[in-house]
Image (tube, rainbow, N blue to C red):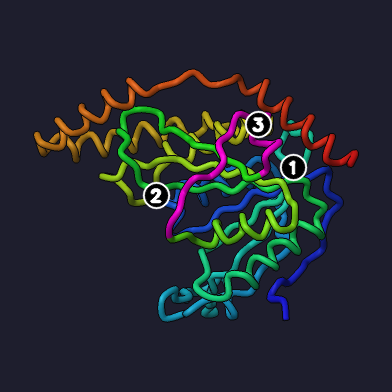
Amino acid sequence: MSALEWNDIPELDHPLVVVAFQGWFDAGEAATDAVDCLADLGEAVEIARIDSEPFFNFQEQRPTVAYGTDGDRVITWPDTVVRAVRPNGASRDLVLISGVEPHLRWPSFCRDILSVIEHTGAEMVVTLGAMVAVVPHTRPLVVTGSSTTPELARRLGLNKPSYQGPTGVVGTLHDALDGASVPVISLRVGIPHYVPGPPNPSGTKALLQQFQRVTGMPTDPGRLDGPIDEWRGRVDLAVADDPDVVAYVAQVEAQADAEADEIPSGDDLAAELEQFLREQSDE
């Protein structure tokens, strides 16, 4: 039995699905914060929810209790929320799926995600993630993109995933999307391993920028400039107390500067993506 609970589904215009989950693949909560930023670009509406009961061990991910505005105690469960939004100035809608990575029954959970894609008429899925990496906090963080859809990878200059090892629910979802022939792109940002805790507005901005470059959807990443300055200032103060860490950050900065590459323009990538989706629709 599906745990997917629907509200009214508005009429959606060629939507893209964006997915992120707190947990193993969301260092600094940069990915789920990016999804929330996308929801703030318009009037986001909750259209569905995946009930947490079949998928969570509540001794590991406990619900929270608080007093509501009416004075009654309210329990909040770690449900997965599905929202729809039309960003201001965008040519298509977004369907945003976010929550906490479930503990149990990942194949069943992924089937519920596939049901959302089917019922909303989504044309493609973009998963967002964040992993700790050897990168400095003083530079714009780098986003890596990949796709298991060969034609999509070729057109956008993306790599085929090469990781082998333990995976999370996002990896399971990619396998389910491949099996259902749903085009999918993975965007993941590297977070400085010496400051892995949330929030990480620099990582969130990097994901928003790359999402905008690839899809052509406006994301307004500049609104995070202020929080990024504050975040870097706090990290600078913490780093300055340890000469060894100062020297290490300088070393990582030099490595990052040496590896900086030129990348295709956002207009070129977005045009290729639109052409790909038009061809998929014609087929």
The residue lying at 40 percent from left, 40 percent from top is: 190
What number is the disc on residue 28?
A: 2
Q: Is residue 161 covered in magenta? A: yes
Tell me the mark number nearer the camera, choosing from 2 and 1.
Answer: 2
The location of residue 219, given as percent across then percent down, is 61, 34
The residue lying at 47 percent from left, 79 percent from top is: 57
Marks 3/1: CA distance? 28 Å
Tell me the mark number nearer the camera, choosing from 3 and 2.
Answer: 3
Q: Which residue is mark 3?
A: 154
Marks 2/1: CA distance? 27 Å
> N-terminal of the two: label 3 or label 1?
1
| Quarter of the rendering containing residue 211 | top right
> N-terminal of the two: label 2 or label 1?
2
What number is the disc on residue 86?
A: 1
Q: Amino acid at mark 3?
A: Arg
| Region of the chain picked out in magenta, as a range | 149-165
| Quarter of the rendering containing residue 51 | bottom right
